[in-house]
Image (cartoon, rainbow, N blue to C red):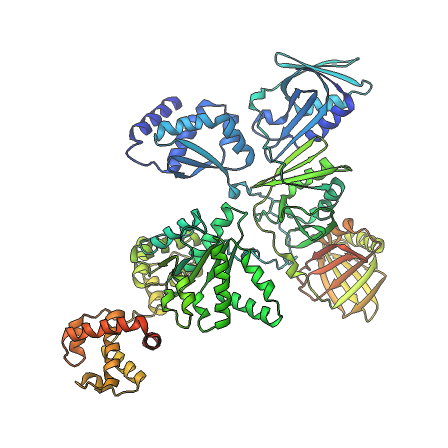
Amino acid sequence: MKIEAIKEQLEEALIKADKIVGRNASLPVLSGFYLDAKDNILTVKATNLDLGISVSVPVKVTEPGIVVVPAHIITSFVSSLSTDRNITLSTKSQVLDIKTKATKTSIKTLPSEDFPLIPEIKEDNHFSIPARDLVFGIRSVIYSAAVGSIKPELSSISITHEGEFLTFAATDSFRLAEKNIKIKKVPHFKQILIPQKNALEIIKIFDRGEEEISISIEEHQMALRSNGIYLTSRIIEGNFPDYRQIIPKESTTSAVVLKQDLINSLKTSLIFSDSFNQLSLRVSPKDKRFEIESKNSTVGESVQNVESVLEGEDISINVNHRYFTDCFQSITTDSISLSFSGQAKPIIIKGVGDTSFLYLVMPMNQS
Amino acid sequence: MAVLQAFYLAFKGYTVSNKIQMDYKQLWQKVLVEMELGISNANFTTWFKDTRIVKEDGGVIVLSVPNAFVKEWLLTKYHNMILRSLRNLESSVHAVEYVVNKEESRRRDDRVQKEVGTKELPLPEVEVNKDDNLNPRYTFESFVIGPFNELAHAAAQAVIKKPGIMYNPLFIYGSTGHGKTHLIQAIGNHVKATTPSKKVYYMTSEQFGQDCMNALQNQKMNVFKEKYRKYDVLIVDDIQFFSDKQKFQEELFHLFNTLYDNNRQIIFSSDKHPHFITGLEDRLKSRLAAGMTVDIPAPDKESRIAIISAKAVQQGIVLSPEIIDYLAHSINGNIRELEGAVNSLLCQAELKGKELSMVDVRNYIKNNIKPKKTVAVKDVVRIIADFFNIKEESIYEKTRHKEVIRPRQIIMYILREDFNISYPAIGQKLGGRDHTTVIHSCEKIKTDLKQDQNLLEEINQIRGLITV
């Protein structure tokens, strides 16, 4: 193999592929990149056997060939080159030589015949969505997915569509986040469940992309394609719980607060929260007070009053601090509405005037 | 040493392959030994971990693999090696296929979140799929096949192979708790799993009726008609509830014709043969019976043993062979009762915190299972005489009044059909009649039944009275 590449392009491809290189795999070849040069294209492949990626970069191929090199070595090396623009890669027996104007480096290769194939998903039935929207949708809900649950449906992101909206949802059964994103095209799938871990990688790889991503689905497996990147992930077989039926239809108490005020008060109460992260919310429309109390027997206690517009009955309810605050990252409006519908019922949190995002959080047991 | 062992295993496997069918686990173990010797350890653990043989079908071995990567890799890299060693062990093997097993790709993570205090969202358990109404719990894997239901099972398999062409409609009947619903839903689940493009829908007659009523009230019959006509496989459970409901029958009739003409598979279940469902229009009856009509009778004892064992395994309870045998012996017929018995035994075992002894099981059975039906001829006579409003004694007398003859014949017929009493015994009990008289009476009722709707209804009502 002998090729000439432009540093920035090669570096970008390597960094993208490096994100999903297998780390603790028992098979050494999995920690490598599979570099395949032909027809003036260099394809960088990597896999951790859960996700597979292949990134194409235009290069000048003098001599086509295949080589597997340790991913972290070549990625760090190429990133460290600062001045040179052109890089020449060539193989000689079991060594990959990398030459630039100023440097001459050789990296030991790995046996290429052991490198796994990346499953190829047919593109004939695909659906495309701007990368920005996909990443935004996943990011808006992913923190609610369970980490390593025995129920695989709960440790995944559900994507469904209804009319002109694509709905992203995730829940770990203690809280639930749902985000609707308007789409132009109607997808061909009913529902996909992407494992939470893989969804994290999808965010990293396609983040800040303006291009369209084409999504194709097969049994057990999905593929995302855009701009020379091909990413394939396992998908979960199963049904996401039909959560819509547990969203309370009516509320007994509602509160509207400024997001920043609430976040500030919660920051203070976090200092005094106990080992269960318990917060007490006391909403009293009669006294026109919305209080957040946290207590820690070893540190002390604190009560914050948040300025708010309140309606309905008085209620006092305990929540987990972390679950309660997680959702603020997905709320883009300045004001937040909280609706309560009783002691053992979930609290609904939304941005005022924003119907695209919904968050449910369960209260803690009253003790 | 390992090499020798592998040779030994391969040799042994080769010599016996034609005589015995090695069980899958053993066979695969032997293949794994060979593979391990042939490839590097790292490759072996990466690619052969969590693989197993799921089935063998006419020389085609189906391997379950944890994910698509492994499938692809085994197929391109190790396919020949696997096939070769399988053939060495089982000469009948001629192909290997790979399937991704979703169960095993669900990696169990130890870091299960433990959150103190916060209540859980009351998320509905994913039990019934809204789109097709099927309960995923009912599959062929969990369906216990015995002599009593193998015909029904075979018919179901035939339907799966060629939905809409073989046996259309498929009509399955049998008493409650004999596994009708399980079987027909398993067909639906199987078709759905193998050909996701086919639209499958399961409904009970009640749902259909409800839907029809709503459509009538809201004047949306068109929507209703459209809804059911789009399915490729339509499953209707408990069709007997349509009796005497003219409008529903009419809708079902038209729906049936449309689906049938388009070669869509239709599956029905009922508690009786279509001809014996009362209050059903003839044109519907004849259509229901036009395809394949199979009966699921009560399970025989061997099947009951198999079912109890299967349920016990499902519930994770250990029952000794004696207990299983005793349960199978004392609980007759209904699979639901068998299941209930296993469940309550499980519950008791958990309460007591120890394994159940035979005495516990006996006590349970004594308190919970209704005794076997025994019948006195006198009681049957009394019930039927009451039913026809005639004097009990007149049955035993030699009167030949018309109003007595009919009930007497019915009594003979029921004693014979339902309680299997011999002809001479019946004759003797009913005032010393000759056995040929009894035979004649039974035949008479049998032939009359074929034409006389009222008689059939009467007999069914009488049967109801007797079993109460």
**Nearer-the-camera pick, B263 or A110:** B263
Left/right placement of residue B12 relative to residue A324 reads left
**Nearer-the-camera pick, A39 or B19:** A39
Above or below, A288 against B73 in this view is below
Task: Say which quarter of the image contains residue B296.
Answer: bottom left
Residue B255 at x, y percent in the picture: 51, 62
The residue that appears at 82% across and 66% down in the rendered structure is A310
- Which residue ends up furthest to the bottom in the rendered image? B391
Task: Say which quarter of the image contains residue B228.
Answer: bottom right
Task: Say which quarter of the image contains residue B290.
Answer: bottom left
The residue that appears at 66% across and 40% down in the rendered structure is A215
Quadrant holding the C terminus of chain A: bottom right
Above or below, A116 against A222 in this view is above
The residue that appears at 34% across and 29% down in the rendered structure is B91
**Nearer-the-camera pick, B58 or B87:** B58
Quadrant holding the N terminus of chain A: top right
Task: Say how many tags the image has.
Answer: 0
Residue A338 at x, y percent in the picture: 77, 60
Answer whether residue B35 is visible to the viewer in this image.
no
Above or below, B32 against B174 in this view is above
**Nearer-the-camera pick, A317 or A200:** A200
Residue B117 at x, y percent in the picture: 65, 57
Answer whether residue A364 is visible to the viewer in this image.
yes
Residue A156 at x, y percent in the picture: 63, 46
Left/right placement of residue A363 relative to residue B454 reads right
Left/right placement of residue A275 relative to residue B82 reads right
